[in-house]
Image: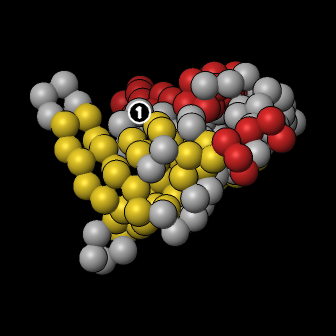
Amino acid sequence: MTMVRMTLAALLLNLVPSVALADAIEDLDRLDSRIEVLTGAAPGQPGGAITPLDRRLKLAACQQPATIEWAGSDALAVRCPSIGWRLRVAIAPIGAAQGKAMLSVHRGDTVEVSVSGDAYDVTATGIALDDGAEGSSIRLKIGAAGTQTSAIVTGPGTVSLSR
């Protein structure tokens, strides 16, 4: 009987971590902080998330850090690929003061795309799919295949993929 009890106890102990993991929820404060770092603005500020993430959300904890990417010039996509949840976070407009006259890139413009790292610096050309002021994110098309990505406007006719 003791062997049966020990086997049963071992099986139950193996279940405890998975039950605890299933009950874990994603840290929304950490996601808000990561969004603020990516946008460079606090929630409610021009260029930042319109509001902090809704604290009523109870998302299962992602095993790896959730991915946060620009989804156009006015939103971020926050995803946990391993679990399957995803959020769309609206970004507050920069404001009327930086309207059309302040745009550095216009939709349809050919832009210089740069990517920089510790040991490299690469430039190419792309086509802007959105209007954008300096510091904002735009969608663009790169290469003959028309691969779409997002980049940060760094100046008149220039964007950067480096973050």
Q: Nearer the viewer, residue 162 or 99?
A: 99
Q: Residue furthest front?
A: 101
- At 62% from the left and 56% from the top, the residue drawn is 131
Q: Residue furthest left?
A: 119
Q: Nearer the viewer, residue 154 or 31?
A: 154
Query: Splitting the image into 4 quarters, where does residue 110 fall?
Result: bottom left
- How many numbered discs, if any? 1
Q: Residue furthest bottom?
A: 145
- Asked whether the viewer can see residue 141, the reply is yes
- At 54% from the left and 52% from the top, the residue drawn is 105
Q: Is residue 66 above or below residue 42?
A: below
- At 26% from the left and 35% from the top, the residue drawn is 116
- Asked whether the viewer can see residue 85, the reply is no
Query: Mark 1: which amino acid?
Result: Arg
Residue, disc 1: 163
Q: Is residue 83 above or below residue 160?
A: below
Q: Nearer the viewer, residue 132 or 143?
A: 132
Q: Dot 1: what SS?
A: loop
Q: Nearer the viewer, residue 55 or 121?
A: 121
Q: Is residue 15 left or right of residue 111?
A: right
Query: Splitting the image into 4 quarters, where does residue 14 fall?
Result: top left
Q: Position of residue 42 (x, y in %)?
A: 73, 22
Q: Is residue 148 left or right of residue 78?
A: left
- The N terminus lies in which quarter of the figure? top left
Q: Is residue 102 above or below residue 36?
A: below
